Image (cartoon, rainbow, N blue to C red):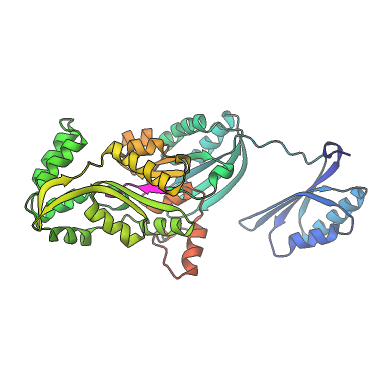
Amino acid sequence: MTSEHVQTLSLTLTGEDRPGVTSTILRAISGTGAEVLDIQQVAVHGHLTLALLLDPGDHSDELRDAAAVTAHRLGLSLTVLEGSGDNARPRQGRAAVVVLGAPLLADAVGLVTTRIADHGANIDRIRRLSRYPVTTVEFDISGAFVPALRNELALVAASSGIDIAVAPGGLARRGRRLVVLDVDSTLIQQEVIELLAAHCGREEEVAAVTARAMAGELDFEQSLRARVATLGGLPESVLAEVRRDIVLTPGARTLVRTLKRLGFTVGLVSGGFIEIVGGLAAELGIQHARANRLELRDGLLTGGLVGEVVDRAGKAAALREFAALEGLPLSRTVAIGDGANDLDMLHIAGLGVAFNAKPLVREQAHTSVNVPYLDSVLYLLGITREEIEEADLDDGTPTAAPPVPGLRS
């Protein structure tokens, strides 16, 4: 007899969760020769749902009676359905939809689920990834066309004040990745050129050049060279002073530490300076770093640069190079940045994340994160807060972002 003609029993038990429920049910139906075709269980806030799909053979009535008696004894509700075969439908077009909010309001979640349904996709599973410092839930869905759904949910994100990431599911969600971060205002909270200017009292000169660039009078390279020119004559020792002043973005260490535990590769790309970026990479154990190099002569900054400028195209080129060195396709890469000069690498990465970015960047990136915690990017990859903290606890590393007072997990 083929599997299409095998009669099945679907047993679904619900009620208070406690140890031993599953083993008690399975012991009750053992000895009948029933074949387990599927078994799934979830416990949420102390409430258990256990579902078994069985081929009962010639013992359908015996299975029903045993399940009913045991469910009654355990104080569980039981639903029994007859079927044919394993009733499994192909789960094509699998995708993961991750929703972040602080707070995450029911209205916003309702809009997300409505848009998924309107898209013609089905929600197969929902799980919470974090409760703090943001609330994050992941929808495992099937029947989705990722590019179109990503665009549709971007409208929901913009209107609801939440962040939504849509990524292919299945094996595409698993395996090693390359994660490349911008530095200024992404990995760190400051802009290095401004720190250098502050150390020599030339903030106004640098600000004037920045204003010209914002007005469209200068492109990135012209602006960078003009700002670096104002630093001419500074002693090399100022670089060490600036390195000491660097403040990492909250969650940066947790992000890098967790990615490395997973065997992921991390890289830094910056329109800033390798004299600063290289030190950050070494401190955090980051494998790849690319940035501009300041020209030094006789222990002084000349006000010039050495080599090609790392601009918008240069960042994308660095991402491609890092991926090639790691033997990874671009689909296995994640890029994180905040500015317009990050857009090329955000576009070519498998997942481009705009982190507290300008509106133009948020609109063009695959997704955005608009909370001040860099480790929130981990949730977009399906990693839970619980998993992060358990790993930190195992090796005695304190998790950087603390719980928000008054919130319960």
Compare residues 187 and 314 and report the one nearer the observer: 314
Q: Residue at x 66, y 55 (%)?
A: 47
Q: Pick out the residue farthest to the bottom.
A: 396
Compare residues 186 and 104 and report the one nearer the observer: 186
Q: Is residue 119 above or below residue 22?
A: above
Q: Is residue 395 above or below residue 69?
A: below
Q: Residue at x 36, y 39 (%)?
A: 345
The x, y position of residue 142, in whole percent, is 61, 36
Residue 259 lies in the magenta stretch: no
Q: Quadrant of the N terminus?
A: top right
Residue 180 lies in the magenta stretch: yes
Q: Is residue 374 above or below residue 282?
A: above
Q: Is residue 183 above or below residue 235?
A: above
The x, y position of residue 295, in whole percent, is 14, 50
Q: Residue at x 52, y 47 (%)?
A: 137
Residue 248 occupies which quadrant of the picture? bottom left
Magenta residue span: 179-184
Lateral position of residue 57 relative to residue 15, left or right: right
Lateral position of residue 363 relative to residue 78, left or right: left
Compare residues 264 and 104 and report the one nearer the observer: 264
The x, y position of residue 90, in whole percent, is 69, 36
The answer to whether residue 21 is seen in the rendering is: yes
Lateral position of residue 41 relative to residue 338, left or right: right
The x, y position of residue 176, in whole percent, is 50, 50
Compare residues 392 and 266 and report the one nearer the observer: 266
Q: How many marks?
A: 0
The answer to whether residue 105 is seen in the rendering is: no
Q: Pick out the residue farthest to the left.
A: 233
